[in-house]
């Protein structure tokens, strides 16, 4: 049977920590809590479950805090938990069973991370696999009978265990602040973080968050080392910014960069909202329909389904009202029917 160290980094988690720890004690052989500066009852709650509570001075870097927590672990495997997660009784039993049968060659166990879309996280799937259990010390082995080499890729097992993500709210403002500090320090933003920044803006960003990101994404567009995907992400962000600023020329300059490659749902949606504001409702409908049927979302799945459908319903109603005002009953009837059909689809 394997042993498990639970490693957590926390700060001011008094609202969710007890719930989380209660769901971990059934399979944890030790619990490591790294506190990055709590001023509430977090440490008091943690002390009910473990004596291994460590202070770590926050340096705007989650990786450093995670690495420190790993350095304190002593068991064979490390389970990474956040305070806003919980595991129900059925899945606790699955982890207990996993401890009995896990093969020693497994380096990483992935578990299904659930309930991600309820609180505007940066993910576009309500369930997806995430690595949650890691072998603390990897054993390197030679492979291949000829031209032998050391196996570097981890052996990953996809389990059927489900982890429920249940935060009190989203962490957008915290994350945007960290992105801005990273940029101010002149650090290179990786392709992964570039995508996460753009996604989080589209999913949870306020107008001021977009404005603060403006110079960074202009830099992306002008950087010939950035990929097509990154330029597309930057163009969508800049299109939204210039739309907010009512700079129509710049708005079209950047949205067209998206449309002329492979139009995204977000780009089509932005054009739909523009034409709706201009009271060109037929044209707006065309772009909202494109957002749903003729493109794919690259930043937020809601721009491929929920948001354009909502806008379409409003446009059909406005077109119906216009048709009635112009004494065109047959045309009004068409828009009434279109609205009913769309409402049935949504149901």
Image: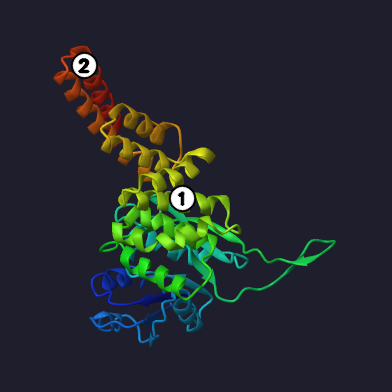
Against 40, residue 205 (above or below) is above
Q: Nearer the viewer, residue 234 or 1?
A: 234
- Residue 53 percent across, percent down from the top left: 37, 85
Q: What residue is shown with label 2?
A: 333
Q: Residues within 10 Å of mark 1 (few under 14, many from 20)?
A: many
The answer to which quarter of the image holds residue 27 is bottom left
Quarter of the image for the C terminus: give it: top left
Residue 169 vs 281, above or below: the answer is below
Judged by depth in the image, the label closer to the viewer, 2 or 1, is 1
> Looking at the image, which residue is at 32% across and 80% down?
49
Work out how far the residue at label 2 is from the one at label 1, CA to CA, in angstroms.
39 Å
Q: Quadrant of residue 301?
A: top left
Residue 198 at x, y = what percent?
Answer: 43, 56
Res. 100 visible in picture: yes
Confirm whether residue 87 shows in the render: no
Which residue is denoted by mark 1 in the rendering?
A: 235
Above-or-below relation of 134 to 218: below
Determine the residue positioned at 25% across, 64% down. Answer: 168
Q: Secondary structure at mark 2?
A: helix
Dot label at residue 183: none
């Amino acid at each position: 049977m394997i042993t498990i160290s639970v490693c957590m980094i926390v700060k001011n988690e008094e609202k969710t920590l007890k719930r989380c720890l209660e769901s971990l004690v059934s399979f944890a052989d030790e619990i490591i809590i790294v506190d990055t500066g709590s001023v509430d009852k977090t440490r008091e709650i943690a002390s009910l479950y473990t004596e291994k509570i460590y202070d770590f001075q926050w340096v705007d870097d989650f990786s450093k805090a995670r690495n420190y927590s790993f350095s304190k672990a002593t068991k064979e495997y490390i389970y990474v938990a956040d305070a806003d997660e919980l595991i129900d009784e059925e899945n606790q039993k699955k982890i207990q069973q996993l401890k009995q049968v896990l093969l020693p060659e497994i380096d990483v166990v992935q578990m299904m991370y659930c309930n991600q879309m309820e609180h505007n996280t940066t993910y576009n799937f309500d369930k997806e696999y995430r690595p949650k259990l890691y072998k603390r010390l990897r054993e390197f082995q030679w492979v291949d009978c000829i031209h032998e080499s050391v196996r570097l890729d981890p052996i990953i097992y996809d389990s059927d265990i489900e982890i429920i993500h249940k935060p009190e709210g989203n962490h957008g403002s915290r994350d945007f602040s960290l992105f801005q500090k990273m940029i101010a320090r002149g650090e290179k933003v990786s392709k992964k973080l570039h995508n996460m920044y753009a996604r989080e803006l589209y999913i949870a960003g306020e107008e001021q968050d977009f404005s603060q990101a403006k110079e960074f994404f202009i830099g992306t567009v002008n950087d010939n080392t950035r990929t097509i995907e990154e330029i597309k992400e930057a163009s969508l962000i800049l299109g939204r910014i210039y739309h907010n600023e009512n700079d129509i020329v710049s708005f079209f300059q950047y949205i067209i960069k998206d449309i002329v490659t492979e139009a995204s749902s977000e780009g089509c949606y932005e054009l739909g909202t523009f034409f709706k504001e201009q009271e060109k409702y037929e044209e707006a409908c065309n772009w909202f329909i494109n957002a749903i049927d003729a493109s794919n979302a690259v930043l937020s799945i809601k721009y491929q389904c929920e948001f354009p459908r909502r806008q379409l319903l409003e446009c059909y109603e406005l077109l119906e009202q216009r048709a009635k005002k112009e004494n065109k009953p047959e045309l009004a009837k068409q828009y009434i029917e279109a609205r009913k059909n769309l409402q049935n689809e949504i149901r």
